[in-house]
Image (cartoon, grey):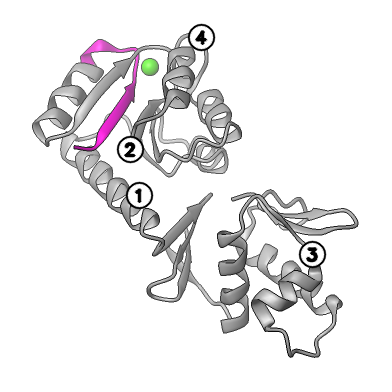
Amino acid sequence: MPRILIVEDEPAISFGLELDLKTDGYEVEVVEDGESAVRRGHEGGFDLIVLDLMLPKKDGFEVCRELRRGGIKTPILMLTARNLEVEKVLGLDLGADDYVTKPFSPKELRARVRALLRRGSSEEAGERYSFSDVEVDFARGEVRRGGVCVEMTPLEFQLIGVFVKNRGRVLSRDRLLDLAWGTDTHVTQRVVDNYIVTLRKKLEPEPAAPRFLMSVRGQGYRFDG
Ligand code: CA
C-alpha cells in the first residue's frame, strides 16, 4: 500500500485530502508544519509527499530544498495557493515533481497523485528518471522537458544515461569517453566538453549556471540530478 505524507496546516483541506486518499487505498499521515515535514520526510518510508507552500515554522519551498539537499528523492506534489508562474517555477527548480493550484478539485489532485506514484515505480524499475522538469524515458529513448520532447542525438542520450546511472559520482573525461563513446574511439576530451555544453543548453534551467551537470575542477563532471 503506497504511503503518502500530507503537509498542510489548514485542517479543512488536510481532512478532506486524507479522506480522499484513504478511500483510494493509500496509507496517509498528516503533519501541520514545515519542521515536522522535514523530519518525517528524512525518516522516510513515504512514496509521495503532498506539500503545501504556506506553512508554519518553515514554508514549503524550504521544506523541499532541505529534503532534496538531504538526498531525499520522494516525489513531491506542491500545493500552490495562487496561480503564480514564479511559484511553480521556483518549486520545480527546488526539486518538486508537480504542483496543483489551490483551490483544486479532489479529482484532479487524485489524478496527479496516481501519475506521480506511477512515475515513481517506473523509476524504481530503471525505466525512467526525473530531475527538475526533465524526464528521461529509457524505455522509449526519449527526454522530455516540462512534458515536451527534447531533441537528442543518440550519443547525447547515451551520455545522459551514463550520468543518470552514475549520479553523484565524479566522472573524468576519459571515463566518460569509455562509457558513452566506447573504448575504441578516437575523439578527444575536448569533444566531451562540447557535449556537456550542449546537454546543459538542452536540460539546465540556466545553462551558464548549471545545477545538474556540474564541472568538478581538474577532475571531470558530476551529475547532481
Ligand atoms: Ca497552508
Q: Disc number at residue 172?
A: 3
**Crowding near the residue tagged with mark 3, few <14, some 14–19, many ≥20 C-alpha atoms within 10 Å:** some
Q: CA distance from mark 1 to mark 3?
A: 30 Å
Q: Quadrant of ligand 1?
A: top left
Q: Nearer the N terminus, badge 3 or badge 4?
A: 4
**SS of the residue under disc 2:** loop
Return the disc, 2 or 3, that comes first in the chain's sequence: 2
Amino acid type, residue under disc 1 in the picture: Gly
Going 47% across and 18% down the picture, which residue do you hit?
A: 39
- For marks 1 and 2 on the same chain, the one whose residue lies earlier in the sequence: 2
Instruction: Kindly identify which residue carries mark 2.
Output: 47
Q: Earlier in the sequence, mark 1 or mark 3?
A: 1
Q: Amino acid at mark 3?
A: Ser
Q: Can residue 210 be found in the magenta stretch?
A: no
Q: CA distance from mark 1 to mark 2?
A: 8 Å
- Asked if the residue at tag 2 contacts the one at tag 1, i.e. Cβ–Cβ closer than 8 Å, the answer is yes
* In front: label 4 or label 2: 2
Q: CA distance from mark 3 to mark 4?
A: 42 Å
Mark 1 = which residue?
120
Is the residue under label 4 in contact with that under label 1 (CB below 8 Å)? no
Q: Residues within 10 Å of mark 4 (few under 14, many from 20)?
A: few
Tag 2: residue type? Answer: Asp
Task: Describe residue 193's horizontal placement relative to residue 126 as left or right.
Answer: right
Q: Nearer the viewer, residue 45 or 82?
A: 45
Q: As drawn, which residue projects farthest toward the right? A: 218
User: CB atoms at circles 3 and 4 under 8 Å apart?
Assistant: no
Q: Which residue is mark 4?
A: 57
Give the magenta range.
1-12
Q: Residue at x 39, y 55 (%)?
A: 123
Q: CA distance from mark 1 to mark 4?
A: 29 Å
